[in-house]
Image (cartoon, helix red, strand yellow):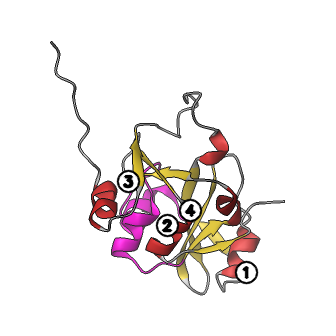
C-alpha cells in the first residue's frame, strides 16, 4: 500500500501552532487560475508590500479579486503616496518572494504597519499565503489581525 505523504508544515503554520491560533493549512496556489470548487476566489486574500513616502514599507491585504487603492492605503498609513515595491526588491524587503508574502512571517521579522481590507470582517474566514508558493492558510480575519497587529480599513479601489 502506498504511504500517504504528509506535507511538512510551513514556518507560518509552525508559528501559528506555537501561538495556539486556529487555522487550516491548504495546498492551493492563488497565482494559478485553477482553484477547486470549495473556495470562492474572493475568500483568498493577497498580501501586498508597498513603500510609503513617509513611513517606509506598509503591507496591504485584500481579496485577489480586487484592486488596491494606493490613495486609500497612503491616507490611512500616514503617507502622501505609496507605491508597489518592485518584484526584484520584494524578498530583501519582506523575506518572501512574489506569491509567498504573508502577514504572519512578515510580522515576525519586521514592524511594518499591516492593513487588512474591511471586507474580511464579513467572512467566516479568509485564505492567505502560508509563506510558500502553493501553500495557504485559512484563518479567521480577526485572529489574524490580532496576531499581526493589523488594522481593518477600506483598501479597495472604488
Q: Nearer the viewer, mark 1 or mark 4?
A: 4
Q: Earlier in the sequence, mark 1 or mark 4?
A: 1
Tag shown at residue 131: 3
Residue in view at x 38 percent, y 58 percent: 96
Q: Earlier in the sequence, mark 2 or mark 1?
A: 1
Q: Earlier in the sequence, mark 3 or mark 1?
A: 1
Crowd around label 4: few <14 · some 14–19 · many ≥20 (10 Å): many
Residue 102 painted magenta: yes
Q: Where does the magenta region start and end?
A: 85-113
Q: Which residue is mark 4?
A: 141
Q: Nearer the viewer, mark 2 or mark 1?
A: 2
- The furthest residue to the right: 158
The answer to whether marks 3 and 1 mark residues whose Cβ atoms lie closer than 8 Å is no
- Disc 1, SS: helix
The answer to whether marks 4 and 2 mark residues whose Cβ atoms lie closer than 8 Å is yes
**On the rendered structure, is 145 left or right of 130?**
right
Residue 79's spot in the image, x, y percent?
67, 84
Amino acid at each position: 500500500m502506498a504511504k500517504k505523504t504528509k506535507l511538512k508544515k510551513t514556518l507560518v503554520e509552525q508559528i501559528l501552532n506555537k501561538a495556539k491560533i486556529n487555522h487550516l493549512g491548504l495546498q492551493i496556489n492563488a497565482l494559478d487560475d485553477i482553484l477547486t470548487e470549495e473556495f470562492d476566489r474572493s475568500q483568498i486574500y493577497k498580501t501586498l508590500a508597498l513603500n510609503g513616502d513617509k513611513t517606509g514599507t506598509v503591507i496591504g491585504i485584500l481579496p485577489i479579486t480586487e484592486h488596491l487603492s494606493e490613495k486609500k492605503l497612503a491616507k490611512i498609513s500616514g503617507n502622501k503616496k505609496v507605491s508597489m515595491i518592485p518584484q526584484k526588491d520584494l524578498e530583501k524587503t519582506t523575506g518572501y518572494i512574489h506569491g509567498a508574502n504573508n502577514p504572519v512571517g512578515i510580522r515576525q521579522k519586521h514592524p511594518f504597519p499591516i492593513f487588512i481590507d474591511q471586507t474580511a470582517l464579513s467572512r467566516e474566514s479568509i485564505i492567505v499565503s502560508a509563506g510558500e508558493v502553493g501553500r495557504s492558510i485559512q484563518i479567521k480575519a480577526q485572529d489574524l489581525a490580532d496576531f499581526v497587529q493589523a488594522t481593518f480599513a477600506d483598501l479597495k479601489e472604488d
